Image (cartoon, rainbow, N blue to C red):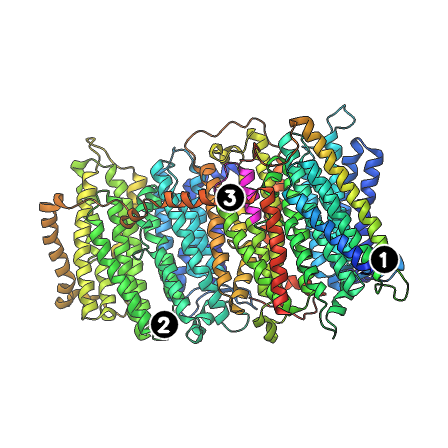
Amino acid sequence: MNIDTLFALALATPIAALLACLWRPARERMLSLLVLAPLPALAVALAALLNPDAMPTLILDPDRRIGLMLDRPGAILLGVAALLWSAAGAYAATYLRGKPHGGRFVVFWLLTLTGSLGVFVAADLLSFYLTFALVSLAAWGLVAHDGTARARRAGVIYLLLAIVGEVLLLPAFVLLADAGPGASLAIETSVSALPDSPWLAATVALLIAGFGLKAGLAPLHVWLPVAHPAAPMPASAVLSGVIVKAGIIGLIRFLPWDAGLDGWGAALTSIGLFTALYAVAMGVLQSNPKTVLAYSTASQMGLVAAILGMGLAIGDREAVTAGTVYAAHHLLAKGALFLAVGVIAATDRRRLWPVLVPAAILALGFAGLPPTGGYLAKLAAKPVLGSEVVGLLAGLAAVGSTLLMIHFLRRVAAGASPASGAQAAAGLVWPWRLLFLAALLLPWMLAPVAGIRPWAALTDWYAIWSGLWPVLAGGVLALALQRWGERLPRVPEGDLLGLFKDAPQWANAVGERLERTETRLRQWPVAGVLLLVLTLLLWTVVLTMS
Amino acid sequence: MDLSVMLDHLLAVGGNLLVLALMLPVASLMLAFALGGRHAERIALMTLPLGLAIAVAIAAAVLYGDAPLHTDLGGWAPPLGVALRADGLSAIMLLTTAVVMVAVGLFARADFQAPRGATETRASFAFWTLLLALWAALNAVFLGEDLFNLYVALELLTFAAIPLVCLDGRAPTLAAALRYLMFALLGSVLYLLGAALFYGAYGTLDIGQLAARIGGDDPLEPAALIAAALMTAGLAAKTALFPVHLWLPPAHAGAPAAASALLSALAVKASFFLILRIWFDVMPELLAQMAAQILAALGAAAILFGGVLALRQARLKMLIAYSTIAQLGYLFLVFPLVASPETASLAELRNAPGVWTGGVLQLVSHACAKAAMFMAAGLIAASLGHDRIQDLGGIGRALPMTLFAFGIAGLSLMGLPPSGGFMAKWLLLSAALQSGQWWWMLVILAGGLLTGAYLYRVLAPALFAQNPPPAPVKPVDRSREWVVLGLALISVLLGLVPLSAFSLIQIGRDVSGIGLP
Amino acid sequence: MTAVTLFGLCGAALVGLGLYGLIVLPGALRRIIAFNLLGSGVFLLFGVIARRGGGAIAGTGSDPVPQALIITGLVVAFAATALAVALLRRLLQETGRDDWDEAGEADR
C-alpha cells in the first residue's frame, strides 16, 4: 500500500469508527474493537521511521497549505502513542465490559484518539488547533466518565483549564498566522518567520503557557493530579501517557529552534526544573497511587521542558530529538504503570511479585536505572542538559523520581486485592505485559536516532554509574521517608488548587452583583434614559470629530 | 439548459427578482388571510421553497453578474421614487433568512398544525400568517434603499414579531410583548426623527444619493450628525444592544420555540444590518471611526455581561436568550475593525475584507446555531414539560439527537473549530491584531471562555448525571430533530467553506479580492 | 419669528413632552398616549421641513415628499397604537394591571 494512503487511513480509521457509532448495534460492539482503531497510525509511523526519506504528506488546500505531514519527532511520538492507545483499548474492553455507559465511553475515547493522533501529524495552524481542541475537550468525557461527585469535580477542573489552554493558544496561533508570509498557514513557515515578528515575545509566552498547561508544567499542572486519578484505569493511562504529549509536540512544533532565544530557553528550563522537583515534593505527600503517578508525570514533563529549554536557548535541534526520545519512553512506561495499577488491584496481595517486580523496573526507569529504556532516555538527555547547574538539578530530580516511584510502589502494593487467590483477568494482564516489554525495549530501537550506540552504553561503567547513583540515593531517601513519612503533612490532590477554594464564592458574588445591575437595567425608565444617553454620546463623539 | 445560459437569463430578469422577493411573502400572506383555516399552513409551507429559490437566485445573480442588483419601483427614480438594491451583503442576509425560515417552518408544523377536524385554531392561523409577514418585512429591510421605506419595513417587522411573542395569550407574555412593542416603537421614533433630519438637510432619503451628497465637497450638515446618532440609538434598541436590551429576555421567556428562533436569529439582525449601512454606506469614514469605538465598547460589555448572566439563568431558554445578547456583542466589534485609522491607511487592508467576512460569518453562523438551539430547547421543554437546567440530568440518553444538535450548535457559538463561529472569531482576532487594536482580542477570548462555561452547565449534567434519565413526558418527532440537527450542522459546516466563497460579501462594497487569514 | 421656526419649536416641544411621558410616566395607557404625542412631534417636524422647501423638488413652495411620508407615518403610528391598546386590553383582562413592568414576571 502506498504510504500516503496509509497516512490518510491513520486518521480516517478512528473517524470511521466514530461514524459507525451513530448506529446503535455498532456502538455496542465498538468497545472490543478499540484495540484496532490506532493500528493504521502505528503502521504509518513504523513505515516512516524505517524509511525516513519518504515522510508522508497530505496537502488538502495548497493555497493555505492546509494538510497533514509527518517528521521524525512526529513519527516517533505517533508510533508509541498508537501503541499505547491500542494496548489501552484492549485493556478497556475487559475493564469496562458490562459496566454502564459503555457507548458514551467509546464515543469520547474515539474522539480523544482522533485528536490525539491528529496533533502529531497536523501540518498547519488550523488543523493543529482543531486536533488539539479535540483531544483536550473530548478527554473531559473520559475524566468525568464515572459520574461520581469526585469525577464531576475533576471534570470541571479539567475542562476549565483545558479551555484556558485553548484561550491562550488561539491568539498565539493568530499571531503566528500574521507572522507567516502570504496566505500560508503551514506551521513550518509561520514558525520560521516568527523571530522577525514584532509580537515574538507575546507569541512565545502564550505558546509556552498554553502548551505547558497541557504538558503539566507548574503552576498550571494542577489539573493533572485531579483528572488522572478520577478517570477509569485505561483512560488514566492515555491521559497521563499520550494526552500530556500533545503539549510536548506543541512545544516541539511551534518554538523557533534555530533562533537561539536564550532568555526564553532559560525561562523554559527553569520552569521545567522547578516542575520536576516541585511535583516530586507534592507527590510523596499523596496516598492514592494514581495521584502519585500523575505527579510523577508532571515531574517528568518538567524534565522534558528543561531539555527543550536548553535547546531553545542555544538554537540546537539535538535537544528536540533528546526531548522526543525522553517523552516517548515516558509515554510507554507511564501508560504501562497505570495499567499495572488496575492489574495489581485485582491480584491477590500474596502473589504480587510477578506484577510488582516488572512495575518496579519500569518505575525506577524514570530515574534512569540501567539497562531500562529510561536509562537510554537519560543518556540521550545528558549532553543537552550538561554537567553544570542544570545537569546537577536534573540529577537531583532523578533522585526525587526514585523516591517518588518507591512511594508509588508501596502505595500500589497496599491497594492489592485482599481476596486470597484473586487473579486479574487475562484481558488486563496481556496489554500490561505488552506495554512493559515495549517500554523496556523500544527506546533502545531509538538509540541510533539519539546518536547512542547501545552496546557502548551498556558497557560504559561511568555511564552506568551515572544512571545508578540517583537510584541508590533515592533508595536511601525512601528508607527515610518510610521511617518518618508519617510526620509529613498531607496535601490535597492538585496542591495549589487549594488557593482557589473560595473562587466559587467570589464568582458568585460577582454574578449576584451583575444580576442586581441587570434588574436595574431592565427597569423601563432606566432603559429609556440609557437610550437617550446613548444618542447623546454618539452625537457628542461625532461632533467633536467633525 | 446550460448553467451559464441560465445565469444569463437570471441576470436579464435582474431587478425584478428583488420585487419578487418582496411580493412573494406578501402575496402568500394575503392569500392565507383570505382563505384562512388550514390553508394558512399549506400556503406558508408552499411559500418556503419558493422563497428559498428566489433568495438563491438573487445570490447567484449578484455573484455571477459581479454587481449589485438594482431596481426603481414603478419606474420612478429617487428621490421621488423608491429603489430596491441587493448587494452581496443583502444577498447573504436574504439567503440566511430563507434558510432559517424554511427550517423554522418545518419545525413549527407539529406545534401549529390545526387539529384534525377543527377548521383552524387561532394560534395556528396567527403563526403562519405572522411567519410570512415577518419574512416580507425582513426582505424589505435587506432590500430597501429608502430610509423612510426602511422605517416602514422595521415597523412591519415589529408588528409581526410582537404577536409571535404572546401567542399563548398568558399575562406574562402579554406584558413582555407590550414592553417589546413600546420599546421598539421608541426606537423607531428615534430612527424616524433621524430620517426626517437627513431629509431636511439633503433633500433625499435614498441611501445612494445621500452617500453621494454627504461625500461631496460641501461640509457636512450639522443635522446629519444628530440624525445618524438618533438612528443608530433607535436601531440599537431594536437590536437589543447592551444596555438597552431590556425587552429581549422577557420576550423570549414565554414565546414558542419557533418564535424565539425567528426573533433571535433574524429579527434582531435586521436592525443591526441597518446600523452597518448607516455608518459604512452613508456616513463619512472619519466619523464612523469615532462612533465605532462606542458601539464596540457596548458590544464588548454585552459579550461579558450577557455571558455572565447566561451562566446564572435557571431556565434553558433564558440561558439561550442571554447568550444572544452576548453573541450580538461580537457583531458590534466589526465597527472599529473595519473603520480604524490603520485599516484606512493600509492599502491591502482597505475596506478590510477579512473583517467583513468575519462579521458576516459570525452573523450567519450565529443565526443558524441560535435558531437550532432555541428549537432544541423547545423539543426538550416539550418532551419534559419544563426546561429547568438543574433538572435536565440524563437528557442525553432520552433525547440524544436533540442534545447532539444543541451541542454542535454550541460548538459554533463557542468558536471551536471547525465551525463557522471559529472561522468568524479567527478572522476578527486577526483583524484586531492587524489593525493594532489587540484589546478587542481579549474581549473575544473572554467571551469564548464564558460561552464554554454556560454550555458546560447544560451539557455536563445532560451527559453525566448519575440519576436515571427522566422519562420523557412526550416522545419527540424524529423529523423535527432532523431539522434542528440540519440547521446546527450548517452553522458548523460554514467553517469548512473556503473563504474565497465569501467574495460575495464584497460585491457592492467596492472592494476587489478577499483577504485570507 | 417665522412660521417655520414656530412650528419647528412646537414640534421639538412635542417630541420632548412625548419622550418624557413615554420614559418617565407610570401606567401603560399614559405611555401609549405619550408615544402618540412623540409621533405627532416628529410628523410636525416633517411638515416644517416640507414648508421650508429645498427638498426633492426645488422651486415649489412646498415639498410633496414629506407630506406623503407624514400620511404613511400616521397610518403606521395608528396601527402601532391599535396593536398596543389591544395588547393592553388583553393584559387588563388577564391581570387587571395597567403596566408592563416586571414585578412578578415568570422569566427566571
- The label on residue A257 is 2
**Looking at this view, is A501 or B61 the one in front?**
A501
Residue A434 appears anywhere in the view: no
Q: Which circle marks residue B310 in the picture?
A: 3
Instruction: Judge if badges 1 and 2 mark residues of a common chain.
Output: no
Task: Categorize mark 3 by other alpha carbons within 10 Å: few (<14), some (14-19), many (20+).
Answer: many
Given the image, on which type of amino acid does mark 3 rest?
Answer: Ala
Residue type highlighted by circle 2? Trp
The range drawn in magenta is B312-325
**Same subunit under labels 3 and 2?**
no
Task: Name the front one of labels 3 and 2.
Answer: 3
Instruction: Classify residue B268 as left or right of residue A481.
Output: right
Which quadrant does the C terminus of chain A fall into?
bottom right
Q: Quadrant of residue B79?
A: bottom right
Q: Is residue B366 above or below residue B341?
A: above
Q: Is residue B127 above or below residue B20?
A: above
Q: What secondary structure is marked by label 2?
A: loop
Labels in figure, total? 3
Q: Tell me whether the residue at label 3 lies in contact with that at label 1, contact meaning CB atoms closer than 8 angstroms.
A: no
Q: Nearer the viewer, residue A4 or B513?
A: B513
Per the model, the C-alpha gap separating discs 3 and 1 is: 47 Å
Cβ atoms at labels 1 and 2 below 8 Å apart:
no
| Location of residue C55 in the rendering, given as x and y in whole percent from the top left corner | 83, 63
Q: Are marks 3 and 2 in contact (CB under 8 Å)?
A: no
Front label number (3 vs 1): 1
For this view, does A88 lie left or right of residue A469?
A: right
State how far apart marks 1 and 2 are (Cα): 71 Å
Q: Where is residue B30, by image quadrant?
A: top right
Dot 1 corresponds to which residue? C65
Tell me where residue A29 appears, x and y as whole percent: 45, 38
